[in-house]
Image: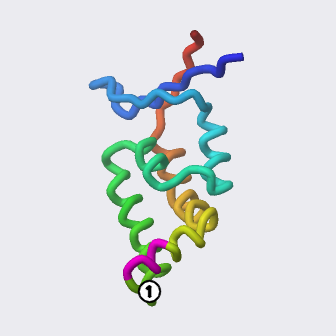
């Protein structure tokens, strides 16, 4: 069974959009459960909000890695998942909900 294809159209005039095999409600559920990383979530946002979202996630990264050095910093972030992804998801949800224009297409 093939899922409906969802086009998230950020600009009705230029046609800029992103195609995904998941519905908006599935994407929201994935983000709430920490199943999407910040780069996937950022790709689903329009340009106007993407930079602010990435900056907010980077701020959380700094908090997690403030007391570490070199390679240990990477482990701090890895050990924080999926809590870190959930925290970024909490920042992402209102941006995604307020900026998306979604249309479903069936193959």
| Location of residue 102 with respect to 88 vertically, above or below | above
Look at 52% across and 61% down and name the residue there: 88
Report the quarter where the C terminus lies: top right
The main secondary structure of the magenta stretch is helix
Residue 73 belongs to the span the image colors magenta? yes
Does residue 90 appear left or right of residue 61 in this picture?
right
Secondary structure at badge 1 equals loop
Disc 1 packing (10 Å; few <14; some 14–19; many ≥20):
few
**Residue 100 in the image: above or below residue 15:** below
**Residue sitting at the far top:** 107
The segment highlighted magenta reads 70-74
The total number of labels drawn is 1
Q: Residue at x 44, y 86 (%)?
A: 68
Examine the rendered structure and indicate whether residue 57 appears above or below residue 107: below
Outermost residue, right side? 1
The residue lying toward the viewer, choosing from 3 and 47, is: 3
């Amino acid at each position: 069974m093939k899922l409906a294809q969802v086009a998230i159209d950020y600009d009705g005039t230029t046609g800029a959009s992103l195609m995904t095999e998941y519905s908006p409600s599935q994407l929201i559920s994935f983000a709430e459960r920490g199943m999407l990383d910040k780069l996937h979530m950022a790709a689903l946002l329009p340009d106007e909000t993407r930079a602010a979202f990435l900056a907010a996630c980077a701020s959380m990264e700094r908090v997690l890695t403030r007391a570490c050095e070199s390679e240990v910093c990477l482990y701090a972030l890895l050990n924080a998942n999926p809590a870190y992804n959930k925290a970024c998801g909490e920042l992402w949800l209102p941006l995604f909900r307020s900026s998306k224009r979604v249309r479903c297409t069936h193959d």
